[in-house]
């Protein structure tokens, strides 16, 4: 990746940040002018004030850390299984014949529908929450990994064979690097969906986490804290997704020029 491409990506990031700031500014102005009722939809400043007057920063940080820990483990488990199953299904035809029907059968089922079974199987502790989050990560990753493997240019594989590469060496030195762009897309989508499952997962007898913070505020009618919690999830996801994107671009840049 050359300097011009790096500069372009930095400009895109800056424009995105400006857009987010502009959105919050418009939201603040609209709320301040009374166009939207502040009791129903508080402004960003009111949401922050309501939250900080109710709980200290250390407590907020504890909720963020608890949620990030659950998302990390859920994504690690679901994403890792997705990569293994997707790559194996795309590389070995017989594995695809066995796994694809089951995946296509279960993929349309919302992960939220598995919550009752997660409680029955794993109880009310952390495993059930991580299970639901891992389902959110698994399906986009396995789909993208499979697509990446079956889309590898056969010319690359034949060229590798003529150079003496066989079996596992072709898979790890040619096929996997060629499928990295698709796999990277699935990883980022899976990470975002893991956050999407977070609130639902933390409905399962949680006593900390950003989702718990939102649901607890709903029970108390604290609209400002609800808004703050929703925005907080978005901000944490945005920051972590950006960090993952930087790492992925550096890794893909070793193999692909784009």
Image (tube, rainbow, N blue to C red):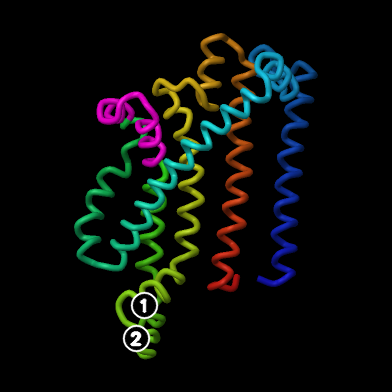
Disc number for residue 29: none
Dividing the picture into quarters, in which one does residue 44 lie? top right
Marks 1/2: CA–CA distance? 8 Å
Crowding near pointer 2: few (<14 within 10 Å), some, many (20+)?
Answer: some
Q: Is residue 53 above or below residue 235?
A: above
- Location of mark 2 (residue): 161
Q: Is residue 226 above or below residue 70?
A: above
Taking the magenta stretch, the answer to whether it contains residue 118 is yes
Q: Are marks 1 and 2 in contact (CB under 8 Å)?
A: yes
Element at label 2: helix
Element at label 1: helix
**Which stretch did the figure color magenta?**
115-135
Residue 104 image position (x, y, % from top left): 28, 49
Name the residue: 34% across, 86% down: 161
Taking the magenta stretch, the answer to whether it contains residue 47 is no
Name the residue: 58% across, 58% down: 247
Q: Earlier in the sequence, mark 1 or mark 2?
A: 2
Looking at the figure, which quarter contains the N terminus?
bottom right
Looking at the figure, which quarter contains the C terminus?
bottom right
* Depth order, front residue of 131/112: 131
Q: What's the magenta bit mostly, secondary-structure-wise?
A: helix
Crowding near pointer 1: few (<14 within 10 Å), some, many (20+)?
Answer: some
Q: Is residue 163 above or below residue 50?
A: below
- Location of mark 1 (residue): 170
Residue 7 image position (x, y, % from top left): 75, 63
């Amino acid at each position: 990746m050359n300097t011009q491409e790096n500069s372009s990506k930095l400009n895109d990031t800056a424009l995105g940040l400006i857009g987010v700031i502009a959105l919050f500014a418009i939201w603040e102005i609209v709320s301040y002018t009374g166009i939207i009722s502040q009791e129903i939809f508080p402004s960003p400043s009111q949401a922050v004030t309501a939250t900080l007057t109710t709980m200290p920063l250390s407590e907020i940080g504890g909720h963020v850390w608890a949620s990030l820990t659950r998302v990390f483990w859920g994504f690690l488990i679901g994403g890792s299984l997705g990569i293994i199953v997707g790559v194996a299904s795309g590389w070995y035809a017989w594995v695809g014949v066995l796994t694809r029907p089951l995946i296509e059968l279960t993929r349309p089922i919302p992960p939220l529908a598995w919550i009752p079974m997660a409680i029955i199987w794993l109880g009310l502790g952390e495993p059930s929450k991580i299970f639901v989050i891992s389902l959110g990560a698994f399906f986009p990753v396995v789909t993208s990994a499979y697509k990446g493997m079956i889309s590898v240019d056969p010319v690359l594989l034949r060229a590798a064979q003529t150079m003496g590469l066989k079996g596992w060496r072709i898979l790890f030195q040619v096929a996997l690097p060629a499928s990295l762009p698709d796999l990277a897309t699935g990883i980022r989508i899976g990470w975002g969906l893991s956050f999407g499952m977070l609130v639902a997962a933390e409905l399962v007898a949680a006593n900390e986490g950003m989702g718990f913070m939102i649901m607890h505020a709903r029970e108390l009618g604290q609209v400002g804290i609800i808004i703050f919690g929703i925005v907080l999830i978005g901000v944490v996801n945005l920051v972590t997704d950006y960090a993952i994107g930087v790492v992925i671009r550096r890794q893909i840049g070793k193999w692909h020029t784009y």
